[in-house]
Image: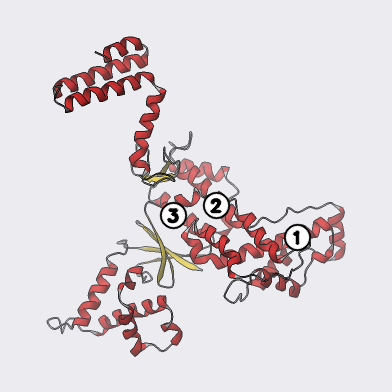
Amino acid sequence: MAQVRFSNNGYDYFDEMLVLFSSDKTHNLLLDYVAKDLSMLPGLLEQYVSKKINIDTFELTDYIYSATDIKEIEQTLVSFHPYYEQEFKNVFINAVGNFINHSLRHLLYKHKSRKYVYDRDPYIEIFKGLTAPLSFTLDTYPDEFYSKYRKLLRIPDDSQFAILLDAGVSYPSAQGFEGELKAHDAIRKMLFWLLDITAPSIGVLPMSQRIRLYSNIDKSHPRDVMGVTKRLTLSPTYLIRDDWENDSEDDVDDNLEDNVVNDELADNREKRNRFRVEDRFELLRKFDFYVDYENIPTEIIDSLGDVTKHISGLSTAETFEEYDVNNLYQLLYLEIMMMIQNGTIIKRCKHCGMYFVVVTRKREYCDRVADGERRPCSAIGRSRSYQKSIKEDPSLEMYNRAYKTHHARQIKGKMEQNDFFRWCNEAKAMLEKVRTGDLDISVFEDWLKK
């Protein structure tokens, strides 16, 4: 579990005091995430599981996993959102545990055999076998998922089991990363129904009506996972950012030599930075600025400079909202709630089709660089849109060709600037008449050639 702090400028996702990643008020992490295709995830997990488990019988094979076996899954998830880079192990374990539980229940009813009602020891063996590549202790995970598995079965005795089988009860086969797929779908729906001003018919509705509409239409999103702890505070958790790592390793190690009491702390880069920040503050706490104002040591000046530089990069909000979050859905759900409170609106870029935050409804193109392009959509979208309209409108194509010719004459001094502007105004007026049917296009073409 990590924490997220929201302000008017976005949010920081952090563990204890270390910022793991941040999102600004463009919300591009969220808007890029909803444009991703997650459909390959079930196949990747089934391919991984089938190396160690016979999917049809759920018997373990002799295959020995290595770290490379989960590399493709990890890289795929990380490409979706930076959350997965920080929380991959937890996400992967949850996906494996849910896959085991739903697969066993599916096999139980498919084969109508109690051999798929596993006791704890064989269940734990399967669980540990499938999570072997992870390089940390599983702690309570196996027992937690075994408890979920027993609740999922809900078969207290053989007589009830027989009744269920006679009734022809069926259960769908397992889908890998089902939680991630559901969360992705739910977040996309929230953006469409609540914030997308290009959404047909509903884009012009006030927020209160859109919320009412959404709450009545989408009953599928996982509201039950939104039990989060909230802290509203004037004294937020102090956060360490990457810019604290600019000091040399020698400087960090010098500070540690006199103070470190834990060898493990010295071997961990993040903890070393955290310790050094506290060291800076400790120097400032002990120094009496009132008494020694005219004689401040160099190390105190340096510490003040470091702290001032860091604090200047933090939010200027007077109150802070911090939440404990357990999954990506909770993080993005909270982000959308903050977007609603801040009056944020989004629309689809007319060039790449992806969502982007807009300040004015008139803006049509985002600042992303689309696949295969060298310039952002905002630079090329309008030009390409105009070129497309030219191809679809013969009269506009005639006007554009004549405009280039007359403009070239004006640049070369063969046409006075006032004459050029007069020609442009007259040409535009005639173009509009052609479009409304008040002027024959052949007459317009002949005039342009003069």
Q: Which mark is residue 29?
A: 3
Q: CA distance from mark 1 to mark 3?
A: 36 Å
Q: Secondary structure at mark 3?
A: helix
- Which residue is labeled 2 in the image? 184
Q: Quadrant of residue 445?
A: top left
Q: Is residue 438 visible?
A: no
Q: Residue at x 61, y 74 (%)?
A: 138
Q: Quadrant of residue 195?
A: top left
Q: Is residue 346 visible?
A: yes
The amino acid on which the numbered mark 3 sits, given as a three-letter code, is Leu
Q: Position of residue 250 (x, y in %)?
A: 32, 82
Q: Position of residue 146 (x, y in %)?
A: 70, 69
- Which residue is labeled 1 in the image? 105
The amino acid on which the numbered mark 2 sits, given as a three-letter code, is His
Q: Residue at x 59, y 71 (%)?
A: 134
Q: CA distance from mark 2 to mark 3?
A: 13 Å
Q: Is 372 placed above or below 232 here?
A: above
* Residue placed most toward the observer, 154 or 68: 68
Q: Secondary structure at mark 1?
A: helix
Dot placed on the residue nearer the N-terminal end, 1 or 3: 3
* Residue placed most toward the observer, 72 or 361: 72
* Residue placed most toward the observer, 95 or 294: 95
How many numbered discs sit on the rendered protein?
3
